[in-house]
Image (cartoon, rainbow, N blue to C red):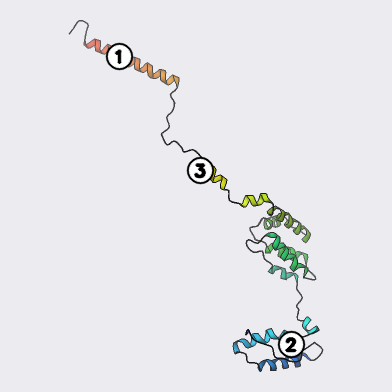
Amino acid sequence: MPKKFIVPSMKMYDGTTDPDNHIAQYKQRMFTTAIAKEYREASMCKGFGSSLTGPALQCRNIERTADDLYEVIQKRGEPLRDYVGRFNKEKVSIPACVTSTAISAFKRGLLPDSDLYKELTKYQCRTMEDVLSRAWAQIRWEEDPAYRHLLSPRSDSRVVRNERPSRDDRPYQRPRSESTSKRSDSRATIDHSTKLRATNAHHPHGQT
């Protein structure tokens, strides 16, 4: 629709006269305006409302139904409090809202990986009051300082790891026990005695 488009002046239609006559008049006035061909159909559709007044204008407001709640979807990163507020605002604008549809739409609009979505999946709610009760409980938890602390980066854990003493890379040496030391000393004494006997056998006393 052109930015500077202005609907031509004509008699307003209030719903008390023949609607076909008004539509014919509207088309005639719109065809006389300088509108590019590619914009003509869109301009006629969007400009028609400005030719209505009174009850005729009110009839153009289509009554909303509970199915319209499926259009309310939680955005990634949007706090749960904001989503609940938007959903409730949309819900109160629906005159006859079916409870089962509202519950289904509320759950489907949640992020599928959120804690509330998992809870509503595991525990079915029969009333919208029960759903909102669980939602506000989750909101209080998400806004609690303890929950926010869990989401914050844990820089202290990195500090603890850096302060850990370096590991000794030398090969492990098993400590010698007392019994092992005694066995080693006994072997050394036996080997020494054996060597002395062998030496005396080759060199008898008195020989040079």
Name the amino acid, label 3.
Asn
> Where residue 49 sits in the image (x, y, percent)?
73, 84
The mark nearer the N terminus, 3 or 1, is: 3
What is the total number of numbered labels drawn onto the structure image?
A: 3
Q: Quadrant of residue 185?
A: top left
User: Closest to the observer: 3 or 193?
Assistant: 3
Regarding mark 3 in the picture, which secondary structure is present there? helix
Which element is circle 1 on?
helix
Residue 194: assigned label? 1
Which of pointers 3 and 2 lies earlier in the amino acid sequence?
2
Q: Residue at x 76, y 56 (%)?
A: 133
Residue 67: image quadrant is bottom right
Q: Nearer the N terminus, badge 2 or badge 1?
A: 2
Q: Is 45 rendered above or below residue 113?
A: below
Question: How crowded is the residue under tag 2: few (<14 C-alpha within 10 Å), some, or many (20+)?
Answer: some
Q: Quadrant of residue 104?
A: bottom right
Vertical arrangement, residue 16 with respect to residue 97, above or below = below
Dots 2, 1 in contact, CB < 8 A: no
Could you tell me which secondary element the residue under label 2 belongs to? helix
Residue 50, x across and y down, in percent: 73, 85
Residue under numbered circle 3: 162
In percent of the image, x 71 and y 60: which residue is there? 81
Q: Which mark is residue 51?
A: 2
Judge depth for marks 3 and 2 and give the one in front.
3
Q: Give the foreground label among 2 and 1.
A: 2
Q: Could you tell me if the residues under marks 3 and 2 are in contact, i.e. CB atoms within 8 Å?
A: no
Above or below, comparing residue 194 to residue 139 in the picture: above
> Residue 2 location, x and y as percent?
62, 85
